[in-house]
Amino acid sequence: MKRLQGNIGIGHVRYPTAGSSSSAEAQPFYVNSPFGIALAHNGNLTNAEDLKELLFSQARRHVNTTSDSEILLNILAHQLCKSGKLKLEAEDMFSAISNVNELVVGGYASIAMIIGHGIVAFRDPNGIRPLVYGKRETENGVEYMFASESVALKADGFEFVRDVEPGEAIYVTEDGQLFSQMCAAKTKHAPCIFEFVYFARPDSVIDKMSVYATRVNMGTKLGEKIAREWADKDIDVVIPIPETSCDVALEIARVLDKPYRQGFVKNRYIGRTFIMPGQEMRKKSVRRKLNAIDREFEGKNVLLVDDSIVRGTTSAQIVEMAREAGAKNVYFASAAPEVRFPNVYGIDMPSAAELIAHGREVDDINESIGSDGLIYQSIEDLIAAVSQENPSVTEFETSVFDGQYITGDINQEYLNRIDALRNDSAKSTREKAMSASLELHNQDESEGE
């Protein structure tokens, strides 16, 4: 990083949510015409196949990977080409982004660096994926930074300015001039609610909503539901599944007036298990990721709290670990409703068939994970918990819970297609193909020596 020259740059840490996870699909992507453009993108384009065909038939552009980020980059590049200018003005940039928003469907927060011009950041018209910007004063003038979460700004010494609005584009020139404009004819503010449940850091603020505060509110709502519906259950202790659920569990313990304990120690070197490819890898990772503190479980009726239940793999193993540690009864509470449908806007949810709640009722799920009782947050309470922090946001993207896709273009054919890409069998096939390619590459390298 220190060897990189210049005063403008972009980077990315996103895992792929469709297509391959090979290094060839690592972002940012780059295209040399016009000007030279690099783009980083968080989200997923739901009409990527149509856009890929359009690029070939109208723009004569070939897409090299299965990544929709490369498609988005080339769509933007093609629109910028239409200006016919050697030096673009702000209005040319915004005209191109407006055309992009007309063509592209899905959830996307994007940043593009254009050689000889500057950086442009833009957010999808529904505001599904988060995007913020900040500034800092230096001896060389004002500097600007864009990021998916406000915490990144603070960590780098930037002052948070505001969220990029749905459908808005912000252009910062090489010499530090900032321009902004709404680039969508029709917008809606419907942020992805799963950011608050799981993905975002608790110290971030998204669309004027503190992630930490929303999780505390989730704990209040769920604690009240447990008090109403589980009055007959003699809960001795509340234990979170670290770490996202800790704030929720602490508030549940307060509402129920029960002790809160850290019963599991987390290995911070193991990643998030629900996005790992392959059931066997996920099973092994759960045991490596968490270790039970036996004395917190021995002879007790334990309420375990997690942020959500996706495949159920983690939940079943954790329930088993609690029993092995000596728990008398193991109850399970989820801070989110039942995850019944795949996400199509940038979260690598499993295929529908691999979701434990798909086509199942709560009693069936409870039996499957082996708990003595299972309770979920209602979708109404989840929405209320989040919107409490910013009542002006009245709609959220909640498709993983209710199957209602906000862009209105998702049908069963599309879901079947992503199912074929995301299921464990398909991922295993791609991993084997990647390994074979790597072996061939290594063989060629050794022969070259």
Image: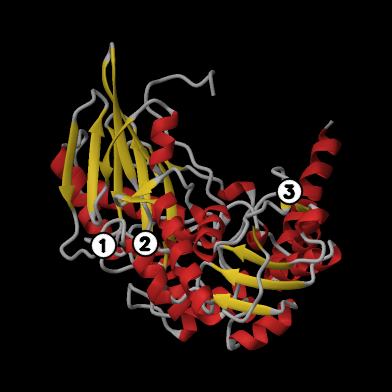
Q: Is residue 64 above or below residue 141?
A: below
Q: Nearer the viewer, residue 184 or 197?
A: 197
**Among the two numbered marks 3 and 1 on one chain, the one whose residue lies closer to the N terminus:** 3
Instruction: Tell me the amino acid under the disc marked 1.
Output: Val
Q: CA distance from mark 3 to mark 1?
A: 36 Å
Q: For the residue marked with disc 3, what is the amino acid?
A: Val
Callout 2: few (<14), some (14-19), or many (20+) C-alpha neighbours within 10 Å? many
Q: Amino acid at mark 2?
A: Val
Which tag, 2 or 3, sits closer to the chain's start? 3
Left or right: 195 with respect to 244? left
Quick check: 174 left or right of 345?
Answer: left
What mark, if any, has residue 265 been given in the picture?
3
The answer, for residue 128, to whether it is visible in the render is yes
Could one spot residue 280 in this view of the protein?
no
- Badge 1 is on which residue? 393
Mark nearest the camera among 3 and 1 is: 3
Find out whether the residues at labels 1 and 2 contact each other: C-beta distance under 8 Å.
yes
